[in-house]
Image (cartoon, rainbow, N blue to C red):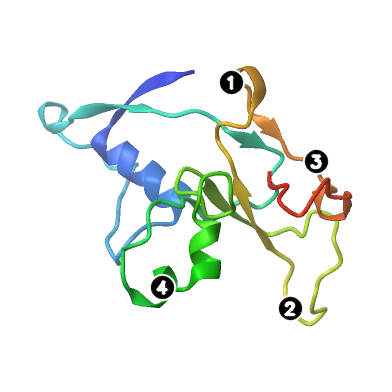
Amino acid sequence: MSIRRLSLQSAGALLVGVLGVGAGGRVDADAEPAAAAVKTCVLRARVVATGLPGAHGVRQVGRFHSGGPLTTNPEFLMQTQSGHVLDPQRVLVALESNLGAAPAEPAHAAGTVLSIDPQAAADGRALAVPPNLGVLPRADTGAAL
């Protein structure tokens, strides 16, 4: 695991750039703040998967709020259990690629969303996503990356 010290301003730019977060605000990583005003923090991160072409949206699933139409649907609720596609510990990653699969609708842009188990990598190494994952045979219907 690699740990780097970043200024809060640089960390904000990193999060905005990588996670696509923002609410109309602007983070300028190139600005030169006064030396005394620069604060630092430690961000701990690890790479959980490689080989993700055009990865844009990266987000941990997290917990769904109780009540409402999603958690009152039994079929949906089953997918939020440990080991399933919406397990709160999993990471969803939106890609610009279909990973070798033909598009479901040729008129639409290519793209897919993967549900990745960050604990699935052996020996703490990142999972290597094959470029043809979309056409590989699945071991069973519950097999998720």
Tag 3 or tag 4, which sits nearer the N-term? Answer: 4
Q: Tell me the quarter of the image containing the C terminus.
A: top right
**Can you identify the residue that label 3 sits on?**
130
Tag 2 or tag 4, which sits nearer the N-term? Answer: 4
Q: Check if mark 4's residue and mark 3's residue have beta carbons within 8 Å.
A: no
Most distant residue in the left direction: 36
Which of the 4 image quadrants contains residue 10?
Answer: top left
Q: CA distance from mark 1 to mark 2?
A: 37 Å
Number of numbered discs visible in the structure rendering: 4
Q: Check if mark 1's residue and mark 4's residue have beta carbons within 8 Å.
A: no
**Can you identify the residue that label 1 sits on?**
124
Vertical placement of 90 versus 101: above or below?
above
Vertical placement of 82 versus 33: above or below?
below
Tag 4 or tag 1, which sits nearer the N-term? Answer: 4
Tag 3 or tag 2, which sits nearer the N-term? Answer: 2
- Left or right, 34 with respect to 99, comes to left
Secondary structure of the residue carrying numbered label 3: loop
- Closer to viewer: mark 4 or mark 2: 4
Q: Amino acid at mark 2?
A: His
Give the residue at x 38% y 45%. 15
- Left or right, 53 with respect to 140, comes to left
Give the residue at x 55% y 68%. 75
- Closer to viewer: mark 1 or mark 4: 4
Would you call the spot at circle 1 few (<14 residues within 10 Å), some (14-19), or many (20 or more)?
Answer: few
Q: Amino acid at mark 1?
A: Gly
Vertical placement of 33 versus 115: above or below?
above
